[in-house]
Image (cartoon, rainbow, N blue to C red):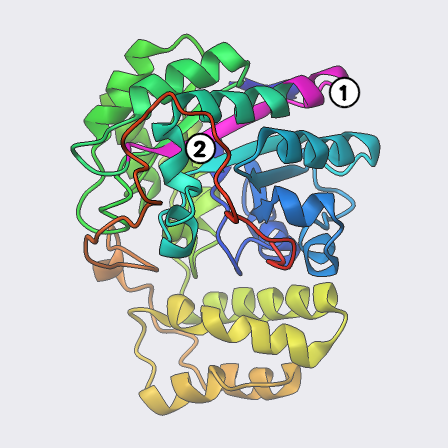
Amino acid sequence: MTLGTFAVDPPVVLAPMAGITNVAFRQLCREQGAGIYVCEMITTVALAVRNPKTDKMIEFAPDENPRSMQLYGVDPAITAKAVRRVVDENLADHIDLNFGCSVRKITSKGGGSAIPWKRNLFGAIVKAAVDTAAPAGIPVTVKMRKGIDDDHLTYLDAGRVAQEAGAKWVALHARTAAQRYSGEADWEAIALLKQALDIPVLGNGDIWEADDALRMVRETGCDGVVVGRGCLGRPWLFADLQAAFAGRPSRAMPNLGEVAAVMRRHATLLSQWWNAEREGVTDFRKHVAWYLKGFPVGSELRRAMAMASSLSELDDLLGKLDHDAPFPLANLGQPRGRTNSPGKVFLPHNWLEDRDDCTVPQDAEHDDSGG
C-alpha cells in the first residue's frame, strides 16, 4: 500500500487519540515498528486562526516521515483555509479528515460522525481539502464510522463520495456513532466497503493483537488496518504488527522490568516534548494503569505512580516493581482503553430530514478548542 510517494509497509496506521498521540507517544511507537503515525485530531478553525495550543499539538519530530495530521472541520471554506496553511508552511506530508467522532458536543452541532449523513456537505469538505492539498502533492484520506445508528448508515455512500472527491483511502471504524466504543466491531461492513470502492480501504475496530490485524485483512480483504486503543500501554504492538505482516511468528512478551524501561522512556520523551519535567511526568500519569494492566502490582504502588511529578520519583517507584514478573498472557486479546455503553446520538434539530442539504452547521467548532 502507498500514500502518495510514501510506501506504507506494514499497512498499519496509528489512530489519532486525544491527549495520547502527541510527538512523544508517536516517537515511542515508531521506535517499535514502521507505519503511519497520526497526530491528535486538530480542528480546522483552530489551525486556520493559529491557536497557540493547537500549534503545540501539530509539532512533529525532526525524523518523522511522513508527517501525518488529522483535521476535523464542518465548513469547506475553513477546511480549505486550514489546508492552505499546511501547504504554505509545509506543516505535514499527509492529511487525514475525521468524520468519526461520536462525542455529544461534536455531533450535537452537526460535526464528526454526523456529517456523512449530509452527503453533499461531506463531499464538499473532502473536495476542498483534496483540491487545496493536491498542488503540493499532499495526499488526503478519510476516516469515518458506519453511520449515526443502525437506521441511518452512511458508510457506503460516504465511501463513494470520498473516492469521487479524490481521497486516497478510506478508513472505516466498523461501529456506528450510537455504539460509541461498545460491543463488537462489524468487520462485515469493512468487507462490503472494500467491495464497493476502487481506492484502498482500511479497517479499524477490535484489533487488540497483531493476529487480529491479519485476521481482519483475511476476512474482509481490506488493504490495511488502523490501530487505536490496542496500543495503549503497549507500544510494542507495532513491533508485533511489523512481524505479523512480514510473516514472522515472533511476538513481544515483555516482562515487568522491560515494561518499566518503556515507561521510563515514555515519561522522558514527554518531558522533552513539554520542555518541562513536571509537565511531562504529569502527562504520563494517565498511561500508568495501561502499562501495568494484568501485572502483579499493588494498588498503593499503582496509585503512587499515577501521582508522580518527577523522573527521579518515577525511577524510585519503578525500582520497586518485580522486574522478573512475566507478561500477563491472560490479558492477550482483551479490550483496552475506553469502553462504554451504546447511547443516543445528539444531532441538530431536523438534521435527519434532508440528506442533500449542504448548509454548514452553525457553531460546530471554535477557535479556542486547542485541537
Task: Give, as a three-letter code, the residue at label 2.
Answer: Lys
Numbered disc 1: secondary structure: helix
**Bounds of the magenta span?**
131-147
**Residue 248 seen anywhere in this rendered image of the structure:** no
Q: Residues within 10 Å of mark 2 (few under 14, many from 20)?
A: many
The residue that label 2 is drawn on is 143
Q: Position of residue 56 (x, y in %)?
A: 72, 57
Relative to 138, say whether 197 is above or below. above
The residue that label 1 is drawn on is 136
Q: Residues within 10 Å of mark 1 (few under 14, many from 20)?
A: some
**Residue 141 seen anywhere in this rendered image of the structure:** yes
Q: Residue at x 67, y 54 (%)?
A: 57
Please tell me whether residue 139 belongs to the stretch shown in magenta.
yes
Numbered disc 2: secondary structure: strand
Q: Position of residue 355 (x, y in %)?
A: 33, 24
Classify residue 244 by image quadrant: top left
Q: Residue at x 26, y 59 (%)?
A: 339
